[in-house]
Image (cartoon, helix red, strand yellow):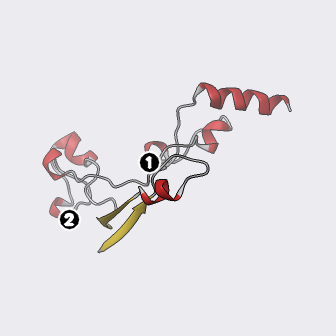
C-alpha cells in the first residue's frame, strides 16, 4: 500500500509561507514493522520455528529500513519523567534519556 506523506519544512514556532512550502512530500509504503528487527530465536540458535513466515529478519540482508515520523523520540517519555520504568522499552516512541533541560524542569516541578 503506497501513500504520500508531507514533512513540513522550517523549524518550530511561526513560519513563513516559504518555509512551509519548503517541506517535502514523499511517497512511502506502509510496510508496518515487517522484518525491521532481527529474530531473537535466529540470533540465539541459528534457526527459527517460523521459518520463512517469521515477521523478524533472519540476517542483516533481510533487514528493512524503518520510516519514522519526523518527531520520533523528540520528547521525553512520561513514564521515565515520573521516575518509573517504561513498559515499551526500546520500542517506545519517546526518549528515555533525559537532557539537562528535562532534569531542570523535573526538579522545578517537584518544588511547586
Q: If you read the primary sequence from the N terminus, does the residue marked by circle 2 or circle 1 appear first?
A: 2
10 Å neighbourhood of mark 1: few (<14), some, or many (≥20)? Answer: few
Write down the residue under mark 2: 53
Reply above or below: 30 against 107: below
Tell me residue 72's x, y (percent).
47, 48
Tell me residue 91's x, y (percent).
44, 48
Which one is in front, 3 or 43? 3
Which one is in front, 49 or 54? 54
10 Å neighbourhood of mark 2: few (<14), some, or many (≥20)? Answer: few
Write down the residue under mark 1: 91
Q: Residue at x 44, y 51 (%)?
A: 70
Tell me residue 7's x, y (percent).
42, 58
Q: Quarter of the image containing the N terminus? A: bottom left
Which one is in front, 74 or 90? 74
Reply above or below: 42 against 83: below
Disc 1 secondary structure class: helix
**Visible in this render: residue 105?**
yes
Reply above or below: 25 against 66: below
Which one is in front, 7 or 47? 7
Disc 2 secondary structure class: helix
Q: In the rendered structure, are the residues bearing label 2 and label 1 in contact, judged by CB atoms less than 8 Å apart?
A: no
Q: On the image, which quarter does residue 4 sit in?
A: bottom left
Q: Residue pushed farthest bottom?
A: 1
Q: Residue at x 86, y 33 (%)?
A: 112
Amino acid at each position: 500500500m503506497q501513500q504520500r506523506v508531507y514533512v513540513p519544512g522550517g523549524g518550530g514556532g511561526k513560519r513563513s509561507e516559504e518555509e512551509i512550502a519548503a517541506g517535502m512530500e514523499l511517497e512511502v509504503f506502509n510496510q508496518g514493522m515487517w522484518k525491521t528487527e532481527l529474530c531473537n530465536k535466529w540470533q540465539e540458535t541459528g534457526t527459527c520455528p517460523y521459518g520463512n513466515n517469521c515477521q523478524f529478519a533472519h540476517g542483516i540482508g533481510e533487514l528493512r529500513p524503518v520510516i519514522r515520523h519526523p518527531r520520533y523520540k523528540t520528547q521525553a517519555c512520561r513514564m521515565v519523567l515520573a521516575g518509573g520504568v517504561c513498559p515499551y522499552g526500546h520500542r517506545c516512541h519517546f526518549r528515555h534519556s533525559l537532557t539537562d533541560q528535562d532534569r531542570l524542569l523535573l526538579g522545578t516541578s517537584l518544588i511547586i
